[in-house]
Amino acid sequence: MMKYLSLPDNATRILPFYLAMEEYAARIIGEDDIFFMWQVEPTVIFGRNQLIASEVNVEYCREHGIAFYRRRSGGGCVYADKDNIMFSYITRSDEVQTTFSAYSTAVAEMLQGLGLNASASDRNDVLIDGRKVSGNAFYHIPGRSIVHGTMLYDTNMEHMLNAITPSREKLTSKGVESVRSHITTLREHLSMGIESFKRYVRETMCDGEIVLTGDEIAEIERLTLPYLEPSFLQGNDPRCEVTKGRRFEGVGSIHMAIELKGGAVQDLHLRGDFLPLCEDVRQTLLNRLRGVNLTEEDLRQALDGSDAGQWILNLTNEQLITLLTTN
């Protein structure tokens, strides 16, 4: 069981505040595992390895007053509003993949307690009758792991469909022709109201409470500021000599921009909706691949004794080699 982290008021804050609240809980608050729920005005949130231009319909968002922010965790782009409940979980565990899987399973079991046919997928989404109701992402700081995600109680489907721009490759890989056909909402399955559902979640997942003080909230507001920096929001779209891109089932999309010298890797940059398992997956890959030619033989030798699945969730060495050697 976990402690529930509460704010002393019911005011709705901007999304980066809650991301900073996770950071504060992970770095400052004691040894307990922590959980809290939050809701925001219409907002798009995209992963640390994604490009705004590829994932967010900026024009639509601005026309309809939808905010958009980048988070520090990997994964894909999601839309949230006041009918969408966001979950945050902070734990002492350094075993990121194990923690991620255990959390997703716990959320599925919590929904099963309401009589729903819920399960966790191989990407640690939560499904009801095979359709996604909750997507999750994570990141790690020394000594703590943070998992956060959506719980789609209900939503403005028009905004969801238009504010984010999933690639045709992504939709084709799922065997569907629209976002709507592979998601569901709790409202389709439950007669329980949203506030009653939130009470049920808290009672099921938590056995105590921590209430933040005014001084702690002020510190969280300070931690919010980096999320608002234009440089963080925009991210990098690096120039490069070679680009590689592929989508793998259970892994997600990986796009790699590679700088070469004499045919050998000198630098690389990553984007996509994959889920990184280490704190700096780009640097980890670069340490393995710097100076390596993009041939099967050289890549196989460079990756010998390593496991790409330790860096990116569900990725195999063979898939990484395929990505790097396919035009």
Image (tube, helix red, strand yellow):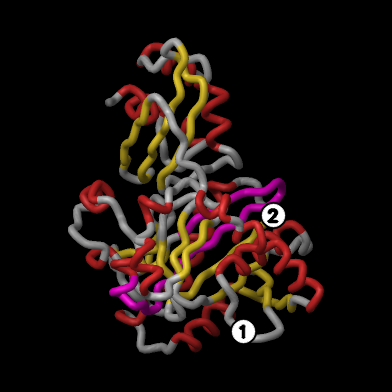
What's under tag 2, amino acid-wise? Arg
Give the image quarter of residue 33: bottom right
Question: Which residue lies under the disc numbered 1?
Answer: 11
Q: How would you classify the magenta stretch by its main secondary structure?
A: strand
Q: Position of residue 232 (x, y in %)?
A: 57, 51
Among the two numbered marks 1 and 2 on one chain, the one whose residue lies closer to the N terminus: 1
Up-down: is 237 above or below 34?
Answer: above
> Mark 1–mark 2 contact, CB under 8 Å?
no
User: Please, what secondary structure does the residue beneath circle 2 have?
Assistant: loop
Give the image quarter of residue 208: bottom right
Label 1 Cα crowd, 10 Å radius (few <14 / some 14-19 / many 20+): few
State which region is magenta.
136-159
**Quadrant (top left/top right/bottom left/bottom right) for the N terminus:** bottom right
Q: Is residue 66 left or right of residue 172?
A: right
Q: Position of residue 279 (x, y in %)?
A: 60, 42
Q: Position of residue 115 (x, y in %)?
A: 37, 78
